[in-house]
Amino acid sequence: MIWVVSALVVIAIGVVSRAALRQQVSLDALPNAVGSTPATGLPEHPQPSDLDTIRFATALRGYDPLAVDRHLDAVRDAWAAGEDRPGTPALEVVLRGYRMDQVDEVLSAVATQDAAAPAANQAPAVSSGALVAADPTGPTNPTDPADPADPADSGALPGARPERPAYRPPAPWRRLDLLVVIGYGLVAFWLLSRLFGDLRGGYLSQGVQDQQAFEWYFGAAAHALATASNPLISDLQNFPAGVNLLANASVLGLSVPLAPLTLLAGPHLTFALVEWLGFAATASCWYALFVRRLHVHRAAAVVGGALVGFSPAMVSHGNGHPNFLAQFLVPVIIDRLLDLQRPGRSRRATMRAGIVLGLLVTWQLWMGEEVLLLAAVGIAIVGIVGTFHGRLDVVRMLPGVLVGVATTVVLFGFPLWWQFAGPQSYTSMWNPIANNDLAALWGRATRTWGSDPWVSAGLSMNRTEENAFFGIPLWLFAIGATAVLWRSVVVRAAALLVLVTSWLSLGSEITLDHQSVPLPPLWPLVSRLPLFDSLLATRFTLIAVPGFAVLLVVALDRALTPRRAYAVAGRSLHPQLHLVVTVTAVAVALAPVVPTRLWVDQRPPVPVFFTSGSWEKYVDDGSVFAVPPPDIIDMRAVDWQATAGWRFPLVEGYFLGPDGSGSGTGMRGAPRRGFSQWLAEIVQHEVARQATSEQVSHFRDDLAVWQVDVVVLPPRDDRAILQPSVASVLGEPTAVDDVLLWDVRGLR
């Protein structure tokens, strides 16, 4: 082969030489090159806003686009605010970066403005040679896009940590941001419009009885404040033992502040308001974080906030889990953590910042501990990436973090003890296998446009646990954005966050359409760690949602800001075309996750016996026994209780508590006694039973233990089965209003 190549070279040389001798080709020097590099667009007398419209061409070797963008943004903000402008950092030389001559020209032009500012704080006019100090070898011709110098010769290799300040002041708030918040609120109201349209008669049926459970939590908190009783435990369910509210998702951080509303308007309105607030406030706070800390175009931040606030996972939990909707403090906590890097803080200011952080964390603990734990996992993953790349000053943050931890321990130490060692507490809880199937990662959720709910149901635990369902287009967009924007540390962190948390969510055995696949799981590595043993693996994809949002936000921001478009598309793609391509890709990526309104069905009406107040004649200081007692399937009795102003307790119920074995193991609901178990079996099998004499004795003893005053059988489809069964234990009932009842105060 080498001989063939050599022969071809010799022939080519001969042909060219012969043509030159015959003057068929010219050997004169080539004419001077005609410059075709596009201008930056910076006017002769620039203003701060002009820094958003300049464009840089790219070269094979040039300044790191992200570092230049960050510096120009900081200069623009300081310039517009009349503050001292930051000095020029040592810019890293990378492959396919901004042309260094253009960057130097812009920085020099900006530095000559406002000469009255102190020279020490102005961006100095510098030459290419000065800015390439981070590259000791220097390119042969730094402005030549065809310079073939080997990047390995550079003192700052692509991917190395550049010298840049760890802290950047947040972007200011604008009036336009208020319109964004209002827009999120309108979207949230639309999602819940069916529920707001029938607050007392409707409920979110795809959450089974979860809405009724949370309405009871709101009522229990309001009753505790109204009666000046202990808000950490309530005997309104599971009488007389009660329910440890801290061992349940009682969202006391919201139910206590909203107690006056609950007392005045009822728990139905409180529940709907908390759901609305969860959607709208979570989207708004993530939007604010993207604007303040990523310094991105506000249109890009709007999309990111909407994805987090109205993702399939959020809409799924909107069917009855307001504790998982109330994620609005997470971005606020992240913002306060980043603010701890602010240089020049006094010791007192650091203490104040740490105390504020501790107060926020404590409030989140009162609203939902699991959300905080999941957020901590996400913050840890992103923090490791940021620290490795020099974007987080952990040493500067540490004092404030320690103060925050101390504040949280002081404020939440006793409640934490109460949760795990107080009355009706438990230390472990059995959970069903709840991992994401691989198909769920790219599937379609139930409450999204054009989805097949039966397919979604086959891939999830239930309608409130569709924690993934991102759709194939969003995954493709995320992969593409990561590949194109890999230089960005923020993108690397977001991509790793999506990858790790999605992998964890697959559980101990990875499956595809319920068939095991030979892939190594991550979940066994953490599942036995403290606190993790009570988590559902499927919920880890809740952490991936902000990761996807960051990838969308950064990609859109690069397209919406013209000078950044060159950093992604280069000179081969016009900025306007880049914008069209990016916006189209974002629209396609988000189309499969556009939500639909939550479904509402009618709840059983409250019997006239309770709405008219007739119950007061039959209840002294004991409890009401509903036939059958409330449980995870049927919680209609808590509506009776709310209608009566929570003035009587109920037997058993739907909550989390000890299983009665004394081992510290928890269960859902109360341990069944003989009478309640017997009634549950009658309802299940739909066959009436006659109690034996021995059963009658035991069942009456159960009623005495529960301190029951009255047994109530409401209008039900299976009343004809339940009435003779209960009559075999207590005799014939008395009809009062629309219920059948047995006055059993004499059994106590």
Image (cartoon, helix red, strand yellow):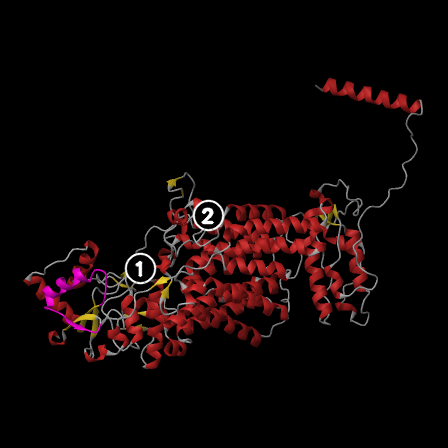
Q: Position of residue 403 (x, y in %)?
A: 49, 71
188 to 132, vertically: above or below: below
The amino acid pointed to by label 1 is Ser
Q: Position of residue 269 (x, y in %)?
A: 40, 72
| Left or right: where 310 falls relative to 208 | right
Q: Is residue 644 magenta?
A: no
In the image, what residue occupies the spot 76% across and 47% down?
138
Residue beneath label 1, please?
428
In the image, what residue occupies the spot 77% across and 42% down?
147
Helix or strand or loop: what does disc 2 sit on? helix
The amino acid pointed to by label 2 is Leu
The magenta segment: 714-737
Helix or strand or loop: what does disc 1 sit on? strand
Residue beneath label 2, please?
441
Residue 233 visible in the picture: yes
Which of discs 2 and 1 lies nearer the camera? The answer is 2
Q: Is residue 728 magenta?
A: yes
